Amino acid sequence: MLRSMRDDFKKYSWTLWLVIIAFLLGFSFTDIFSGGSVSKTVIAKIGDNEIKIERFQKQLLQTLDNYKNQMKGNFNKELITQMRIPEQILQNLINSSIIGIEAKKLNIRATKSELKEMIVNHPAFQKDGKFIGITKYKRYLAMFRTNAKDFESDLKKDIINNKLKQLVTASLVVDNDSLREKYRKEKDSVNLDYIKIKVDSKQSDFNASEEELKEYFEKNKDSFKTPERRSANIIALRFDDFKKDLKLKEQDYYDYFREKKDQFRIPEKIKISRIFIDYNKTDREEVFKRIEKLRKELNTSNFESSARLFSKDRKKDNGGDWGYSEWKSFTSQERSIIKSLKQSEISDPVDTLNGFSILYAKEKTLERQEPYETAKPKIKNLLEREGLRKIVRAKLDKIYKKIMETGNFDKVKNNKSLKIVETGYITNGEAVKDIEQFGYLSRKMFTMKEKEIDYPAEFIDGMAIIKLLSIKYPENESFENVKDKVRTLVIKDKRMIDAIKKNSSLTLSLNKISDKKKLEKFLNDKNMKLENINYQRGNELAGVGKNKKLDSIVFNSDENKFSNPTRIGNNIVIFRAKDIKATSETDFMNDREQFYKDKLTKMKNNYFVSFILNKRSKYDIGINRKLYDKVKESVLSRFN
């Protein structure tokens, strides 16, 4: 609640993006205390500015308590580690410090009057249109385990942050053409049917001359470049190699199950169908009478057919079936009714404020406790994994410490028990031979700088230390090197053209069929399938891909008629557009003011994030890694 309240004060949550982008760039810092005495109070430094251990610990505890309250019994140490919450907190504190430093340079501060205005005018601290008073205000904060001093300190930072943001982004504008295009992408939509046509994969029927190949190559030279490649030295330890060091007993599994029973609950399973009829201000009563009458006639055997006839939402053609999870997007009133329904029960009409719905619980299985015997394999895997991670991490910690004494791998090259793998030049996502096959480590290499050492780098089977050696950037390929690839592409184009010609009469046949079942049979006989999507400008079609011409083709189609076969990337598709909603210039002008504000806010947020990340790159940022790990483990031990 308190977190939500503070979010209300901070109108724009751009700080979250700083954390996310920092994660994309990689969570790596210099160990600022590796060469000297270890500080017992400073956990991080940004230039000459320090982040104290108490600040990090307090912020981490508050955040974890908030998560624990929200997630109840489903929050534990493993989940915290997966979500990387401690790293997020430290990143956020570093970003906040940088913002504070930059604001101070510009003499930006928060005044007492600004702070007072924020507090006394906020709805959370008002009753009958008046401020509740200092005593009740402090009591209210105490309910959420905070005090006025800390809360107001955070608010001051928010004021300063937003002032700096406004100063940095003051000159930004969204030009009208860009705004109109963004508006169309968000507002324009089509209920789109489409059919993918299979293309004959046989190449024997097609040939390509040398002239055709060279012509294609010259037109598409930029498509034929070598990928970026990188090389590294890697020291990796596999979990399985240390199983002999792992000592786990049956009692350990059972104790874990007994202590963490809430983690082993089989969730409720609810399958919902719905009939929905919308209304407006003028016909609400009339619609209510109709749906009340319909409810009296409904039962479990005719619900599906009635939904096909009367429902007005996008699932009507499926008999109103919203499955096991999609119904969770319903209104809170509907979800509340769903919780109260029994298996096979049909609700009375529910008012959703824009329509009435009738809900049918087709299946309903209540949440229950999973037995120990079925939970045991999961517990065994979990405890073994956690135990092996600790063993491998401890061994790599010692190796990493030796490496960091010289900044390279020289210290450990003479250790015969360790194998240093030289990757050679590999691409992003490529398997690293003799270590792992899923590309985790190569993807990590593509986030690093030359000569940088990264640790710990995790992959499915273990952990590693990586030193990036060098980078080879993309270069243009010669015609002779890619001749076979060009031939394949030219022949593919010919196959596409041939397939379009062969299926040119299909559109005429499809448009003659009005009955849905006959259409399904017709397509089934041809081994084709009609797919459906709610398409918006800029979207892509599942299994088809994206194409610049797709928007124009779709929105300029004849409504409710199948199109001619059209090439989209490497696929041939026939479309049928239904319920085309294309905004007019009048629509845009009516919404322009608010839409402009929203887009400008987003642009300013993105620009400010870039600004802070650019400033961040100019600071020497380091952490006291030993102290960070110590605090992290101490706090996380409360969530075992």
Image: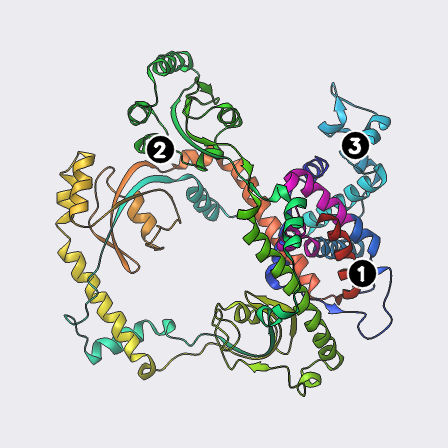
Using the rendered image of the protein, determine whether residue 74 is visible from the camera's viewpoint.
Answer: no
Give percent across and percent down for residue 555: 31, 43
Relative height, residue 555 to residue 315 (above, below): below
| Local crowd size for mark 3, using a 10 Å CA cut-off: few (<14), some (14–19), many (≥20) | few
User: Is 127 within the magenta?
Assistant: no
- Residue closer to the observer: 380 or 366: 380
The answer to whether 490 appears left or right of 407 in the picture is left
Q: Give the secondary structure at mark 1.
A: strand
The answer to whether 112 appears left or right of 220 in the picture is right
Tell me which segment is drawn in magenta: 59-88
| Local crowd size for mark 2, using a 10 Å CA cut-off: few (<14), some (14–19), many (≥20) | some
The answer for how far apart the CA atoms under marks 2 and 1 are is 54 Å
The answer to whether 34 appears left or right of 485 in the picture is right
Q: Residue furthest front?
A: 250
Task: Give the colour scheme shown.
Answer: rainbow
Q: Which residue is mark 3?
A: 143
Which kind of residue does numbered mark 2 sit on?
Answer: Lys
Going 21% across and 65% down the picture, which residue do you hit?
201
